[in-house]
């Protein structure tokens, strides 16, 4: 049986959501800038900090339709869209 053992602590700090960003690209730029500023401020003003780094969040999505990736396969997302199905059919034809 799996058991959870507490073996340390760390601090997670996140940026305020830039609700005023007009596009996803602008939102990501603003989030990155805010994170870099927070990291710099922590390095400058906070004692007893072992490390500070900005970490990029990511998720897997279908390159055709943008749906979340749900499958173990790196090529086929279970038929999430017509393009995903067509690409799988094409791979099947090549394999035969
Ligand atoms: Zn798709």
Image (tube, rainbow, N blue to C red):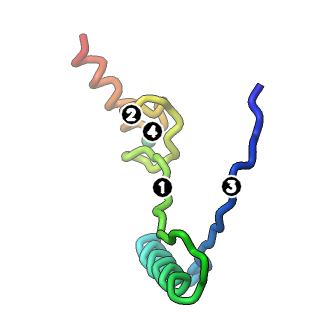
Q: Residue at x 30, y 18 (%)?
A: 92
| Residue at mark 1 | 58
Q: Residue 71: in sight, yes or no?
A: yes
Q: Is mark 3 within 8 Å of ligand 1?
A: no
Percent across and percent down for residue 62 are: 43, 44
Question: Label 2: few (<14), some or many (≥20) within 10 Å?
Answer: few
CB of mark 2 within 8 Å of CB of mark 4? no
Q: CA distance from mark 2 to mark 1?
A: 16 Å
Question: Label 3: few (<14), some or many (≥20) within 10 Å?
Answer: few
| Residue at mark 2 | 74
Question: Label 4: few (<14), some or many (≥20) within 10 Å?
Answer: some
Q: CA distance from mark 2 to mark 3?
A: 34 Å
Question: Label 1: few (<14), some or many (≥20) within 10 Å?
Answer: few
Which residue is outermost to the front? Answer: 48
| Residue at mark 3 | 8
Q: Residue 22: in sight, yes or no?
A: no
| Residue at mark 4 | 81
Which residue is outermost to the top? Answer: 96
Quarter of the rendering containing residue 50: bottom right
Please state the total of marks drawn on the protein image.
4
Q: Residue at x 48, y 84 (%)?
A: 40
Percent across and percent down for residue 23 are: 46, 75
């Amino acid at each position: 049986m799996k058991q959870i053992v507490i073996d340390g602590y760390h601090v997670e700090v996140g940026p305020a959501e830039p609700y005023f960003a007009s596009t996803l690209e602008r939102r990501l730029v603003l989030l990155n800038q805010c994170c870099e500023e927070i990291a710099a401020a922590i390095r400058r003003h906070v004692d007893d900090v072992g490390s500070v780094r900005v970490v990029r969040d990511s998720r897997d999505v279908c390159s055709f339709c943008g749906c979340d990736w749900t499958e173990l396969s790196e090529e086929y997302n279970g038929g999430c869209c017509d393009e995903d199905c067509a690409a799988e059919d094409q791979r099947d034809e090549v394999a035969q």
